[in-house]
Amino acid sequence: MRPLLGEEEVAAAAEVVRSGWVAQGPKVAEFERAFAGYLGAGHGVATSSCTTALHLMLHALGVRRGHEVIVPSFSFIATANAVRYCGAEPVFADVDPLTGNVTAESVRPLLTPRTSAVIVVHQGGVPADVDAVRAVCDGVPVLEDAACAAGSTYRGRRVGVGALMAAWSFHPRKLVTTGEGGMITTDDEELAARLRRLRSHGVTVSAADRHAAGTSIIEEYTETAFNYRMTDIQAAIGIVQLGRLPGLVRQRRGLAARYHELLADVPGVEPVRDPSYGTTNYQTFWVTLADDIALHRNDLLARLSVAGVSARRGIMAAHREEAYAGHPHVPLPVTERLTRRSLILPLHHELTSADQKHIVGALRQAIAAETLGLAR
Ligand SMILES: *Cc1c(COP(=O)(O)O)cnc(C)c1O
């Protein structure tokens, strides 16, 4: 991944610095309106990251000690960690082999009277079938971790539309970046108002609103909360970035289509693709190695590295990390296989057709060499 940043972002950030108002203020409000408007969501609440957005969403639902929250292990570790921030237990659900996402079938058997929420992740930008998950959840709130999914679609609408709450990331690893940053989108006005207070120490009126009021307003702090605010410098960059998103998604989908063509004659390598019900923004272009390829994924990565290709291991699995050692979970065979047998290929706006040919050529050669036992 390479972030697409230009002089427009530089100018937008400079303008905010010159204005003298650098913390959360009018630019954050403008970015929230623009992002919610782009999605077709009622409200946007900007945060300091997607991780803090996930924590705020769970906190706003009252998730606490003694509760369980169903999440995929197959995700960036922040998804599971947010549950622990609330003192609750993450309950890991397995994922679909094609999308890498939890399904109605994997979530249903894990629901208990203690389940206080389910977090569906749209992994790497691939939309999850969230309607199907909602249908089995019987009123248990379904939240969406849409960190990767800006510009992906689900059943003809943008991913995250209609969510009780969806969390977004603006880390440079994602398509829209503000350096660090996040957002919660929701259609629920009361929930949005509560989230705005929670991200800012439970304060009744924001600093920007107090200054704009033209009269003296004394703020109050109604509950113990957090400082999870975004700055106006970040938001100004985000507004410019959002304008680039549709073009960027189009370009990435074109590059992914080219990868699909090139990979069609590399046996045993299955690239990620659109599910039947939606489209991915290809934030992450991962490929899975078939079981009959005897080669270890990490050896393949090493060989690619020698060929000048900076591929990466696939999506992580939280339950395999030290932080979750001993944490009980049901068998997660698909998660295990995907996390061990997948790798992420380079995909960014500066990638050329020649680069892609080189990358796929290197992949083909590495697999052939290892399979023939010529390696190491
Ligand atoms: C990147 C990512 C996060 C964390 O986002 P930050 O903005 O870095 O906190 C959470 N969940 C998923 C699925 C991600 O890919």
Image: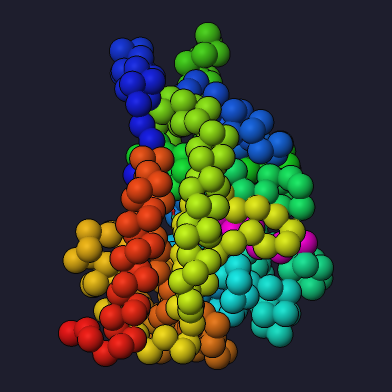
Considering only vertical position in the picture, is 20 above or below 310? above
Q: Quadrant of ligand 1?
A: bottom left
Magenta segment includes 10:
no
Horizontal and vertical percent position of residue 348: 40, 46
Q: Is residue 308 left or right of residue 87?
A: left
Left or right: 141, with 80 as reference point: right
Residue 44 seen in render: yes
Q: Where 145 falls versus 204 (above or below)?
A: below
Along the viewing direction, whichever of 220 and 349 lies nearer the viewer = 349
Query: Is the image coloured rainbow, by chain, by secondary structure, or in one colour?
Result: rainbow
Query: On screen, 80 above or below 374?
Result: above
| Region rendered in magenta | 124-131
Is 301 displayed left or right of 60 in the figure?
A: left
Q: Position of residue 246 (x, y in %)?
A: 57, 35
Please give the name of the residue rendered at 74% of the width and 59% of the height, measured from the top-left corner: 277
Viewer-nearest residue: 68 or 96: 96
Image location (x, y in percent) of residue 207: 46, 25
| Quadrant where the C terminus is found in the figure | bottom left
Q: Residue at x 53, y 58 (%)?
A: 261
